[in-house]
Image (cartoon, helix red, strand yellow):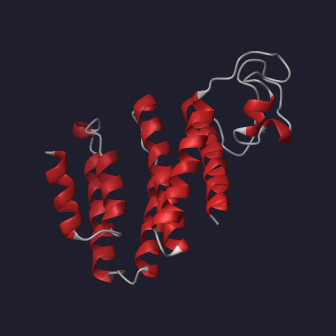
Amino acid sequence: MILIFFILGCIMASFGNVVISRRIKDESIIYPRSYCDNCGKTLKWFNLIPLISYILQFGKCNYCKEKISIKYSIFELVNGIIYMINCQKIDNLLVALIISLEMTLLMVMAIIDIKTLNIYNIQIFILAILANFYSFITEKLNFYKMIFTVILYFTLKIIENKKTIKKLGFGDIYVLLALFIQFNINDFAEFFIILG
């Protein structure tokens, strides 16, 4: 099972790399198919196997022979290791999977935020769904906390859309709101104490 989690982690990081690259370029993550950033040639399925394609192609594009940045493979490897550790340390495999997916999504969101100063609503929405699913599985689902989070989210959206504070940077607050569903107040207090 650990090997399956590792492979899944590599696959999710590979998809995460696509999301990061396409969001930065303001392209669709669905179309066009994956292509070489250097020559623009559409990549075949065997060019897209996480880690393995990079190794077999000696870190170069099969078509133009330009070097492919190792950062993509490092992200795939690190994410695969994170999934393996979660599989090994967390008894419930479904919970391990949800936490692993959340971690991948948070890393993707962080990289996009660093490069573009944007956090996209769809990513926050997916994070909130995962957090709700986690809370449901672990029987920590709190209807009132969900309602409070939704009301607070839309209140902040209204405030954010006012022109005078447009550049306030609410993205981090929305990420914390999505995670608020999953964690209790004490967890958040501990988190902020650690941050200093």
User: Closest to the observer: 81 or 102?
Assistant: 81
Q: Position of residue 99 (x, y in %)?
A: 46, 62
Q: Quadrant of residue 145?
A: bottom left
**Where is residue 54 shown, x and y percent of the image?**
73, 31
Q: Position of residue 159 (x, y in %)?
A: 25, 51
Query: Residue drawn at (74%, 31%), measured in percent from left and top?
Result: 55
In the image, is residue 195 above or below residue 57?
Answer: below
What residue appears at the point 29 percent right and 38 percent down from the top-left corner?
A: 166
Q: Nearest the camera: 82 or 99?
A: 82
Quadrant (top left/top right/bottom left/bottom right) for the C terminus: top left
Residue 70 at what x, y percent from top left? 62, 26
Seen in the picture, residue 72 relative to 147 is either above or below; the reply is above
Residue in the image at 44% along x and 73% along y: 134
140 lies left or right of 137: left
For the N terminus, which image quadrant?
bottom right
Left or right, 147 with respect to 21, comes to left
Residue 109 lies left or right of residue 41; in this view the side is left
